[in-house]
Amino acid sequence: MARSMAEGMIAPDTALVRERQSPRYVLQGRAPALQAAGRLLGLDDAPALLRAATGAGGTALRLGPFELLLLPQADDPAGIEAALGAVPHSLVGVSDRNVTLTLEGPWAARILSGLCPLDFAEHAFPVGMATRSVLEKADAVFWRTAPHRFHIEVWRSFVAYAENGIREVARGITFASLAI
Amino acid sequence: MSGAFRVSGRGRVDTARPVSFRFDGRTIRGYEGDTVASALLAQGQHLMGRSFKYHRPRGPISAGSDEPNALIGVGEGARHTPNLRATQVEIHKGLVTVSQNRGPRLNFDVGAINTWLAPLFPAGFYYKTFMWPRGFWDKVYEPVIRRAAGLGKVATAPDPDHYALHYAHCDVLVIGGGPAGLTAALAAGRTGARVILCDETPELGGTLLSDAHSRIDGLSAAEWVAKAGAELKALPNVQVMTRCTAFNYGPHNMVALNQRLTEHLATPDPAMPRERIWQVRAAEVVVTAGALERPLVFEGNDRPGILLATAARTYLNRYGVLPGKCAVIVTADDSAYRVAIELAEAGVRIAAIADLRANPDAPVVAEAKARGIVVLPSTTIQKANGNLRVRSVELAPVADNGRVGKGQRFVCDCVLMAGGFTPSLHIHSQARGTMRFDEVLGVYLPDRSVERLRSAGSCRGLFALQDVLDDGAAAGLAAAKAAGGGDAERPAPRVTDADAPGAGGFAGALPRRGLGSLALAFVDFQNDVTAKDVKLAVREGFQSIEHIKRYTTTGMATDQGKSSNVNALGIASKELGRAPQRVGLTTFRPPYTPVTFGAFAAHARGDQFDPLRLAPADGWARAQGAVFEDVGLWRRARYFPRGGEDMHAAVTRECSAVRTAAGIFDASTLGKIEVVGPDAAEFMNRFYINAWTKLGVGKCRYGLVCRDNGFVYDDGVVGRIAADRFHVTTTTGGAAGVLNMMEDYLQTEWADLDVWLTSITEEWGVIALQGPKAREILAPLVDGMDISAEALPHMGLKEGTIGGVPMRLFRVSFTGEVGFEINVPSGRMGAVWERIWAAGSPHGLTPYGTEAMHVLRAEKGYLIVGQETDGTMTPGDVGCGWAVSKAKPDFIGKRALALPALNAPDRPQMVGLLTDDPRTVLEEGMQLVRAPEAPAPVSADGHVTSSYYSPALGRSIAIAMVKGGRDRMGETLYAPAIDGAAIKVSIVNPVFYDTEGVRVNG
Amino acid sequence: MLLIACPYCGPRAEIEFAYGGEAHIARPGPGVTEEEWAAFLYLRDNTKGVLAERWRHSHGCGRFFNALRDTRTDRILTTYEMGTPRPDIKEGEAA
């Protein structure tokens, strides 16, 4: 973890951090479009369903059969459009729509189990898995970037609700909770 | 020694750790490990509460969660919890408890007069007695009944504790940590499966902790429990939760557990949740819920001092407490004999064992007799005497023909009932399981379930300990395998010195001598339902057990008939002259035991109850002192009062500013969808009632969405960004619904189209800048863009930057003035807003809220979907018939809009209304009639949908939906008021201001 | 809470989904009679037993799909992609 662990500490060795704005795009289309986007990022193909993959040009999260969330290194929508060319697709910027929260630490998965019905055990939700689900009453994208680290995206207007919800669950998480 | 009834050397309480607590103001001493019930019994106190209806003195009959009588209030002030079972509440230092439903004192209760009035309170008495006079129910009967009946009182202050709710996932969930649960969890755990074992009590072991006789693998039962528990603890894939009750079995194996974390602690860590609910999704569930001993139904069976035989055994072996000095035991099976022997060993005098059976011949019976215990076969209990405590009983012989002979009095201070065992079917029943009647055991057993669960042990009618242990192991292994696990060594504990299984039992009311018409023999203790009530229900014609249950309320208390259902069934079966299997059992409802509201609410309280969505200018508006309103989940600025203005003054000022200078408004909450792809225009054509193909790039159009029933669903301005890209706006409330409807048609009807949808509601913050000076304010800020009326006319659209920030600029108006909607990335909207605000101040720029927005649009006769429309209005009804494309081959709503009924001349039509008195502002929702003096019922010609005071007109205005209204201009209607005379109104054009629409093009 | 196997994402909790009513109801063109249109809008089978119904994984991949659910037991026999025919499975046959 690059930043100081003291920042945003919400449970023992577990921190919640709101990340700065960064470029991101929703790319939708059929297989050739998703494949072209994967190649642009330096991947052989688009990631498999519910998986994230990172190449030299950035990361793609395969959130649905016809949908990628692109997190490119550089903010160059014209470059992406050029790479996709005439392949039918939809590229829409959502850099300001979503806000990223990073939840990192040994209690991260257990905290998420208080907010989301997904099974966050590593065998069920391995590193590299990414999916949309719910964070209590908000929509959220969950991407496990390391055994104890999650990249979470929520829509901007839900950020305070999501952060407060995570903090509330973290309070008391160490008492008699089940291992995930 | 803590209490005269405590025996040394028995029980699992820690006698080295005395604990004091309070009950009804008195200090009671007990030991760590005691419950409130065991500590009070150790003092010789059985009286712990008063009953629901008759205020009868009551003591505990059980030692667990099936307790119907000993309900107490626990904790003080805001932490007070009523109706907890004293048999489960663990004592700790500083614990404060009170008895309930007594007045004024537990041992002196004026409400107990109800017991003498019992003949007036038969089954269904609510329905029979309080029918008339009609008005008496609210004013007399209900308040009196509410005062007299009931249990504890809830705390009214906000709950200071916090609660939690978590999801959990496992291969095998084992419900119940008794003998079968332990072997099930061991068997499943050894395979490596993810196992959760929960038990409602503080310790694993269940009945084994009360069993001082059986030996397992050469160990005492308690020692074997400790060994099994240690093995489970060492398995990393097994998680054990005690004080954790499985209370609800939902569809697809989602089981809710209620874990109590702080209740047993004197000084819990404040960060600790008081309770936590686990929503467990289990691949397989093993139910090892055990069996509950049945009480016997006889006159006075509710007297304090009368309890279940197994409960007496638990108090002795688990808590080291004797139920009394001298006991009479009434039994219908062999199990009570071991209890008698153990109590006798501990110093209790056994006055007699009355056995309902003719020839009890198990070895344990001989063992009891050999100890000199008097055994009376073919003997029933006729009645128990005493008030606050049982003092004696009458035992009477039952002849072969069933006739009951003359009774004999036995002095005693406690009576132990052993009516046989009822398998606990609650969890199985909640899982929509069916039950079958077992003729041999005389009880219902679990049959089939639609869920992936299996029952094991005594909850499926196995009562011999060896069978129970083996059954649990088999079920645990089978469950692990069914969940995809491998094989493992199955636990095979060997039992020696086991008692004979608890075969036999009795269901129904015990035979008695004479009619006993006044006798109160309780079936359901918690709801005060007697045997007579059940009989009466049958006599009055109720045949179905479900109807008998509701008429008498038996089985409907919070204990869900744990102790009463089978006896009620026995009585009903006899009265109906039908075998029990032809009467059936009622459904058990969740929760298994009551759960606090705090646990259900968990994190969702206060500000976290619902998401509060904050618009990008929310912080700015707060700093300006705005008054807010909730619009869906959004918080929106309603108006911006200045210098003590009220809403009317503020809105008038804001409206005037927009009409004379300029106003600024945060319109970011409007839904926005980007429709992109080669087939985007074709999709728009099919989805909207309007035509889109000819809309040029850089142009906007007002679009209306209908459902296929032809009624208006949503509206909004749509801009064409590129040939293959539309920027669609929706209403604030309709955003999610429109996107879902678009996806629905796209994915299911028009899957061939190459077009995709992305929500951009939160990508773009929207600043509405409206008013005659809007252009002047904006022009210097837009980085060289020409926004003159010629370059950017009304309904034009340009992309560019504003202070270097990317912008989609829409020339649109919802006020009737020159208007711009400045779309910028939402994260940078605050900065753009500040720049516009600074530039606009010299021009009189004024922030306005949703209230002024409503007034301004109403002055222009612009509709709001959901205000003028109600899901039954066509585009034509709301004056948008012009938007319906005639050329398109199909669109959503086309067929329906061609129906004659949707084109009838008397359809409701959107019109304006002016009151005679310009100061009168109509109420929205008022009905409109032609003749207000006509006798009721009068059919309405329409209703008011929007009504405001218009600053621009200096008078009130309203919009209404009126039958055939567009052809009725000038006609007079009346709006009848709730108080006062009907208000006279005239029908007018709904465009009140700038009817020619000149200003918007300025 | 039901556990619904999205054909794309696998088994997920019911709160991620939105119900979409009975499946396999073809939307007729605008040339049909009033009666046919009314039937399309309003007439449903109200099946007691195995019902083909639409769901949308609205808080997941966003896709619509169909499910065969026994309305008596809530058991979901199978789920399948939009545009594919109703599988020929009867209650008791599904795993």
Image (cartoon, coloured by chain):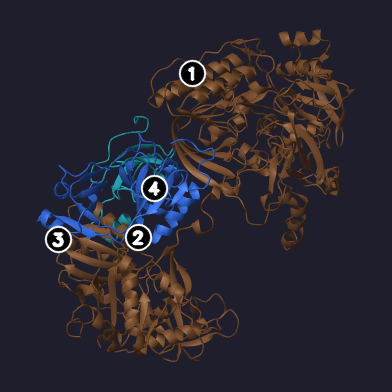
Q: Which chain is brown?
A: B
In the rendered structure, which amino acid carries the disc numbered 3? Ala
Instruction: Give the label, 3 or 1, closer to the camera.
Output: 3
Q: Distance between the residues labelled 1 and 2?
A: 51 Å
Q: Is residue A143 visible?
A: yes
Q: As displayed, is residue B244 above or below residue B484?
A: below
Q: Do discs 3 and 2 belong to a common subunit? A: no
Q: Do the residues labelled 4 and 3 touch (CB within 8 Å)?
A: no
Read off the residue under disc 2: B737
Read off the residue under disc 4: A103
Read off the residue under disc 1: B474
In the rendered structure, which amino acid carries the disc numbered 1? Ala
Q: What element carries label 4?
A: strand
Q: Do discs 4 and 1 belong to a common subunit? A: no
Instruction: Give the label, 1 or 2, closer to the camera.
Output: 1
| Residue at image point 70% right, 44% down | B83
**Front residue of this view, candidates B989 and B920:** B920
Q: Is residue B687 left or right of residue B509?
A: left
Of the 4 image quadrants, the one containing the C terminus of chain B is bottom left
Q: Is residue B320 left or right of residue C79?
A: right
Instruction: Give the label, 4 or 3, closer to the camera.
Output: 4
Read off the residue under disc 3: A78
In the rendered structure, which amino acid carries the disc numbered 2? Gly
